[in-house]
Image: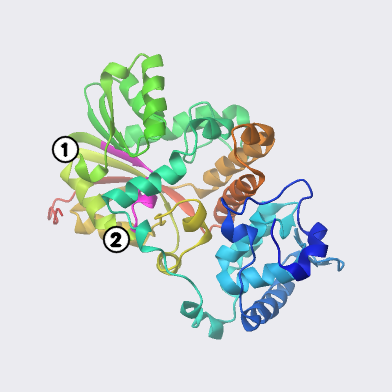
């Protein structure tokens, strides 16, 4: 890891001794931002005071830990404050990737921070947020070209990587467990239960014409085909399409499923059932009107739409949508989690009515816990695939950060039934 010259002799405080950050692959992690002294000092003042009020034990450098709760160990306070003073939450995540802070219970620490996110910065200073947060890069907009690039950056990483931590169904969305806390033995059955709920919601049975927007690795299409449905499923991930087609052939249902490498905006035809599972988060707010209009346009008379989506509070969605976050920089470029208010608004504008709404965020927390534990157990296999230590810390942070959001009830996940409105069709864009 590259650090400033004045800190080089202290690198053992915060750098794992067996690793070095690849400065070409991770330039903003390998080097500290220049940052102004004023911003660094302000970040230090705010965070020291805020953390002292939270149910956290915090250890600053070599000083003894103070407080109560899960332990946040800041190995290099100077680097930690400089990154956050320069980049806010992006800096917070990059500091973890760099090994400058750690936690024995990462989810516990992040859950405390997510629960108290609105208390970390004093109210008067929140008005100045726009002066230091960065806007999302224009190239992350989900144009037809941009969406393809954004999807590939995440979903085309490696099918073998995802197989290391997903359940045998290769489902990359929340399961619905029969009871909580969950066990790994229940995982595949819980994913099938989630899928079956969606297919029931959409009324999928023998002869149903189904459109799936967002193929994943094919499990929903496979299960719909086994009900006797005829399925068209679309994805922008070549890696996912390749494995989905192989799995469908192995299951003996390939003759009932067409897997297209196709943008949802380019789908043709009408369908009795449209299903889309955690796809809207990748669409981007600018294109939500097009997405919902497409759902409506592809729906045959009397058809049903089953939609599964993560949601967040509306004001937080608005703030996140204006900001280049750690998640948008490293994990889901171009993505944005909607609020239920946004879903309701866009559905109505497209001529759709929400007829059923079921939330189960605690099940997503458990899903993420199982993914995170499996991923941690597979560290040597992740390395063998060519992913380095910095990537593993990034992925651990992503899974723990997401789990904490659901445990803090900052995030939720919902299954929705949408049908064509009886009063107005709405504009199809």
Circle 1 packing at 10 Å, graded few (<14), some (14-19), many (20+), is few
Q: Decide if residue 34 is on the left or right side of residue 223.
A: right
Q: Residue at x 44, y 45 (%)?
A: 153
Q: How many marks?
A: 2
What residue is rendered at 62% in x and 70% in y? Answer: 84
Task: Judge whether 197 appears above or below 66 on screen.
Answer: above
Q: Are marks 1 and 2 in contact (CB under 8 Å)?
A: no
- Could you tell me which residue is drawn at 58 percent across and 60 percent down? 28
Q: Position of residue 182 (x, y in %)?
A: 61, 36
Q: Is residue 10 left or right of residue 158?
A: right
Residue segment shown in magenta: 274-284
Q: Secondary structure at mark 1?
A: loop
Instruction: From the image, tell me which residue sits under label 1.
Output: 268
| Label 1 to label 2: alpha-carbon separation | 22 Å
Q: On residue 286, which mark appears?
A: 2
Picture colour scheme: rainbow
Q: Quadrant of residue 314?
A: bottom left
């Amino acid at each position: 890891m590259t650090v400033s010259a004045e800190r080089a002799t202290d690198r053992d405080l915060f750098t794992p001794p067996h690793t070095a950050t690849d400065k070409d692959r991770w330039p903003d992690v390998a080097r500290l931002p220049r940052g102004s002294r004023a911003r660094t000092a302000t970040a230090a003042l705010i965070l020291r005071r805020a953390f002292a009020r939270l149910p956290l034990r915090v250890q600053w450098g070599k000083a003894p830990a103070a407080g109560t709760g899960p332990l946040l160990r800041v190995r290099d306070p100077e680097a930690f404050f400089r990154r956050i003073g320069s980049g806010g939450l992006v800096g917070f995540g990059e500091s973890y990737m760099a090994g400058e802070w750690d936690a024995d219970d990462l989810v516990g620490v992040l859950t405390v921070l997510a629960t108290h996110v609105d208390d970390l910065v004093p109210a008067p200073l929140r008005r100045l947020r726009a002066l230091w947060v960065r806007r999302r890069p224009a190239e992350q907009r989900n144009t037809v070209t941009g969406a393809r690039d954004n999807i590939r950056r995440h979903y085309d990483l490696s099918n073998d990587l995802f197989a290391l931590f997903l359940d045998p169904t290769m489902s990359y969305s929340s399961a619905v467990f029969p009871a909580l806390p969950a066990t790994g033995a229940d995982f595949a059955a819980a994913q099938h239960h989630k899928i079956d709920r969606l297919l029931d919601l959409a009324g999928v049975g023998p002869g149903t014409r189904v459109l799936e927007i967002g193929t994943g690795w094919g499990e929903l299409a496979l299960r719909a085909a086994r009900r006797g449905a005829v399925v068209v499923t679309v994805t922008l991930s070549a890696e996912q399409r390749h494995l989905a087609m192989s799995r469908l052939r192995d299951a003996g249902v390939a003759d009932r499923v067409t897997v297209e490498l196709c943008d949802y905006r380019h789908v043709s035809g009408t369908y009795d059932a449209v299903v889309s599972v955690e796809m809207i988060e990748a669409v981007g707010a600018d294109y939500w009107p097009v997405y919902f209009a497409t759902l409506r346009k592809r729906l045959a008379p009397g058809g049903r739409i089953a939609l599964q989506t993560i949601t967040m509070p509306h004001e937080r969605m608005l703030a996140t949508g204006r900001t280049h976050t750690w998640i948008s920089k490293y994990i889901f470029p171009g993505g944005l989690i909607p609020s239920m208010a946004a879903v309701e608004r866009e559905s109505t504008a497209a001529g759709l009515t929400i007829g059923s709404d079921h939330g189960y965020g605690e099940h997503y927390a458990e899903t993420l816990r199982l993914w995170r534990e499996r991923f941690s157990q597979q560290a040597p296999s992740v390395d063998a695939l060519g992913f380095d230590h910095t990537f593993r810390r990034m992925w651990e942070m992503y899974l723990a950060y997401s789990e904490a959001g659901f445990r803090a009830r900052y995030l939720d996940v919902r299954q929705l039934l949408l049908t064509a409105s009886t009063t107005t069709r709405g504009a199809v864009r």
